[in-house]
Amino acid sequence: MSFLTNLFKRSGSTRNPATTDPIRSQAPRIYSRGEHSVSRRYISEGALKVLYRLNNAGFKAYLVGGAVRDILLERLPKDFDIATNAHPEEIRDLFRNSRLIGRRFRLAHVRFGREIIEVATFRAGHDGDEDGASINDGGRILRDNVYGELHDDVWRRDFTVNALYYDINDFSIVDYVGGVEDITHRRLRLIGDPALRYREDPVRMLRAIRFASKLDFDVDDATLEAFDRYGDLLKEIAPARLFDESLKMFHSGHGLKTFESLHETGLFAHLFPQAAQTFEPDPHSYNLVIESMRNTDQRLADDKSVNPAFIFAAILWGALQARFSSLIADDVNEIEAFSMAADDVISEQVRRVAIPRRFTTVAREIWLFQSRLCRPTRKRADKLLDHPRFRAAYDFLLLRARAGEPLSDIAQWWTDLQDTDDDGRETMLATLHQPAKKNHRRSRSPRRKSAD
Ligand code: ATP
Ligand code: MG
């Protein structure tokens, strides 16, 4: 059963008037220490230090967001976010090990060794005209630095399950939006009117998919329905932010599920338009993304390292092939066609999702190795085996075979070559013929189809 059908299955009757039409002054439900499972035992030392120091300095301090949600779900929090009424400069003055970051959303990072605690000042609603605020004509929040109190901040958060505040003062949980109940029923609900909230920040659609996949939650109808209408707004988001979000989506250990629902909701095409276009004419390219997500999830589950270049190489493989074929059809020689196709596909992609060069370089190498792996020569095979990128390129070849490309024999040959001893390897290599000296076709400038 597809993930999306799964998402819809249990949803429908999950609307809570308190969150679809918030009455801002309503009293919160307070869960006292005895009524919930969040214990300081599960909170990192760094986060506790920040909470206590803020509190001792006379500020309010709450653990909020993913950490509270994850502890209630008996999951290990990924990181710790703190909300306070201290202003960014006050936070910076309290912690020598802190720095202020972000323009759109200013907050403090407090560092303890490798751990970074995010400390954000309570936000208040605004119409874009106040100091520190800015909203564009479409309703997107460009700057969100108007400060308020907890009862203002709660409505600025994205999902009910992310809007629970653990009070370091009395260890209670403050819940204005029915988040604890939603956690119990495993449902993901956006706070407020989806149209408004997605226009304010379209990345919330990606976050909805990410959390539903990671937590195995149902998404309520209203939260999902707006995707069709607002997916296009992702175009307006900074490509660097979309890269960060893509990394989180595909490298959280639930990449396959996330990808499937991104695809089914149509959001994937807004992030990777070239790739999405190849899925239908070339089902292998779709299968390759599935296989690479499955592979990455498995590696993460086994505590193995993953290089993000691999996933991006897989996502763009179909687009690379399509571009390459059209250049070959235009009489460009293979070497040049490969290089141009890789350049074209990457440069078009990074305008949408800014994959950093250190990853696109590796993706290119993985691609470049594919033709070499598929046509091994005696001289080349030895060299390839020793190359630092061999492993990734070989894994990529295996996944292509698994995705249905007719490569099982050659993939098996490379597997055998690595498994055998020196003599065996010598015998295998001896069976490879040396390529006859090729008459390389002279490179020609491509004739663009449109120019014909
Ligand atoms: P993760 O486990 O991925 O860290 P998280 O819920 O903690 O999940 P963060 O990105 O760390 O997510 O953000 C911390 C909190 O800040 C969220 O729980 C949410 O309350 C709020 N938040 C983050 N991004 C947004 C957003 N785009 N719109 C509204 N609220 C947001
Ligand atoms: Mg977090």
Image (cartoon, rainbow, N blue to C red):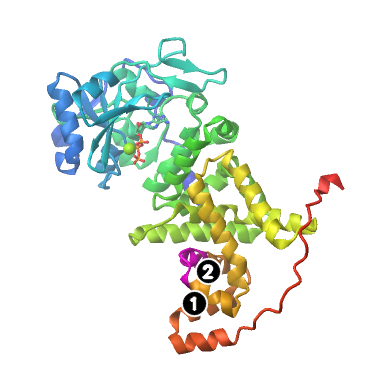
* Residue appearing at x 53%, y 31% in the figure: 237
Q: Is residue 393 magenta?
A: yes
Which amino acid does the dot numbered 2 rest on? Leu
Position of residue 256 measured from the top left corner of the image (x, y, whole percent): 47, 54
Question: Against 424, is 297 above or below?
Answer: above
Which residue range is magenta in the image? 386-395
Q: Residues within 10 Å of mark 2 (few under 14, many from 20)?
A: many
- Residue at the far right in the pictured view: 452
Horizontal side of 55 relative to 432 (left or right) equals left
Residue 397, image x and y in percent?
A: 55, 67
Picture coordinates of residue 158, whole percent (x, y):
40, 30
Q: CA distance from mark 2 to mark 1?
A: 9 Å
Bin the neighbour count of mark 1 within 10 Å (Cα to Cα): few under 14, some 14-19, many 20 and up.
few
CB-based contact (under 8 Å), mark 2 and mark 1: yes
Magenta stretch encompasses residue 90: no
Q: Going by the image, does 110 lie left or right of 193?
A: left
Which residue is pictured at 32% across the width and 39% down the height? 183
Tag 2 secondary structure: helix
Where is 353 relative to 398, above or below? above
Residue 162 at least partly seen? yes
What secondary structure do most residues of the magenta stretch adopt? Answer: helix
Q: Is residue 184 left or right of residue 335?
A: left
Picture layout, residue 394 above or below residue 140: below
Q: Is label 1's Cβ within 8 Å of ligand 1?
A: no
For the image shown, how many numbered marks are present on the structure? 2
Disc 2 designates what residue? 398
Amino acid type of disc 1? Thr
**Residue 5 in view, yes or no:** no
| Element marked by disc 1 | helix
Residue position for label 1:
415
From the viewer's side, name the closer residue of 125 and 105.
105
